[in-house]
Image: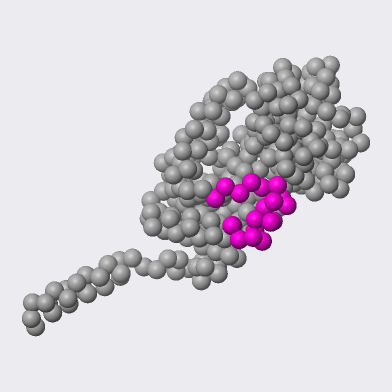
Amino acid sequence: MNRRGLIATTGSLALAGHAAAQPAWPDRAVTIVVPFGAGTAPDLMARLAAPRLSARWGQPVVVQNVVGAAGVVGVERVARAAPDGHTLVLPGDAAIVVRISMTPRPPYDPQRDLAPIMLVGRTTNVLVVASQTPYRSLADIVAAARAQPGTITFGHAGTGTSQHIGGEMLAQMAGVRLTGVAYNDLGAMAIDVQSGRVTMSLMGSVNALPRVRDGSLRALGVSTPARFAALPEVPSIAEQGLPGFDASAWFGLYAPAGTPAAIVARINRDMRAALEQPEARSRFDTLGVDLVAGTPEELARTIATEIPRMRAVLRAAGVEGA
C-alpha cells in the first residue's frame, strides 16, 4: 500500500472510531419530567412539544408528572439522572431560583447540578376572586386586609412559587398582612377560590383565563408591569398603586449537569422549532403564555440574576433560611 493509501485508510479508521465513540442520540425514549400536575403551564408546554420532538427524534417523548415541593421533587429526580440527554425536566422558577434560598435547601444546586437548555416561556399571574364576592379592585382587597389583618387569604401553588412570592410582595408593598394557603392540586385551589373558601389567588394565566372567561372568577389585576394582552381591560397591580410590582412565572428546560454540549444544543434547536410552529404559537397565545425559546446561555444568566433578587424578597417576607 502506498503512503497516500495508508493515510486514507488510517483516517477512515480514525473517523470510524470517533463515530463509534459518539452513539446516535436519542437511542431510546426521552422523558420530560414536569414537576406539576396535568393542565398546568409547564405540563401544557411539554405536551405541546412532545409529539413534535418525537417526530424529529424518531423516539417516543414521554411527559411524566412528578408533583411535590413546588417542583423540587421532580427537579431532584432529574438532577440525579444519567447525563445522557434522555431525561429532562421542565420546572417553574421556584425550584430553580427561589427554594435555593430557603430552609430546608433543595438536595441539589441548580447552577451546579443542572445543564440549562432553554427558557421556554413566561406566564402572567392574574389576581382573581370569586365572582360573587364584593371585591372589585385591588383597593377593595387592601382595605379589607387593613380592617381585618390576617383574615384575607391567598391560594398558591407552594412556597416559593411565583404565586406565593406575588402574594408576599403584594402584602409588603401594600403594608398589609395576608395569609397564604398552599396547594399541590391547582384544581382544588381554583374550586376553593370560586367558593370563597380562599379569598383570592394570583393564579397562573393558564388556569385563570378559562374561569375568568366563563364568569366563575373575577380578575382584579395582573402581575406584569404592563397590561396583559389576553385581558386588556384588567389593570396591572402596578398601576393600581403598587408601582414596580412584577410577579410573573417563568419555565425552563434542563438536563442533568454533564450532558454533552452537542446534545444540549440539539435539544434547544429542536425544541425551538417545535414550539415556533404556527399551531403551537396559536395555542400559547390562547393560554396566555409568552413564548421565549431562548438559548442555554440566556437561561443561565436568568438564573444567576434571579437567585439574589428572590432572596431579597424572601428576606423581606421573613421566610426561614433566606
Residue 102 position in % (x across, y down): 55, 30
From the viewer's side, name the closer residue of 82 and 249.
249
The residue lying toward the viewer, choosing from 5 and 181, is 5
1 over 227 or under it: above or below: below
Query: Please, which residue is most extreme toward the bottom here?
Result: 1
Badge count: 0
Q: Is residue 52 above or below residue 308?
A: below
Tell me: residue 265, above or below residue 136: below
Q: Residue at x 68, y 40 (%)?
A: 124
Q: Left or right: 67 with respect to 2?
A: right
Horizontal arrangement in the rendering, residue 17 relative to residue 221 (left or right): left
Whether residue 291 appears in magenta in the rendering, the answer is yes
Residue 159 visible? The answer is: no
Q: Quadrant of residue 171?
A: top right
Whole-percent x and y of residue 148?
Answer: 83, 18
In the image shown, does 220 or 133 lie closer to the viewer?
220
Foreground of the two, 120 or 61? 120
Q: Residue at x 84, y 21 (%)?
A: 144
* Residue found at x 90% / y 32%: 133
Left or right, 191 with respect to 115, comes to right
Residue displayed at 81% across by 23% down = 139
Is any part of residue 217 visible from this angle?
A: yes
164 vs 5: above or below? above
Span colored in magenta: 275-293
| Residue that lies at the very extreme toward the left in this rendered image | 2
Q: Quadrant of the C terminus?
A: top right
* Quadrant that contains the N terminus: bottom left
Residue 10, how many percent across, how many down?
A: 16, 73
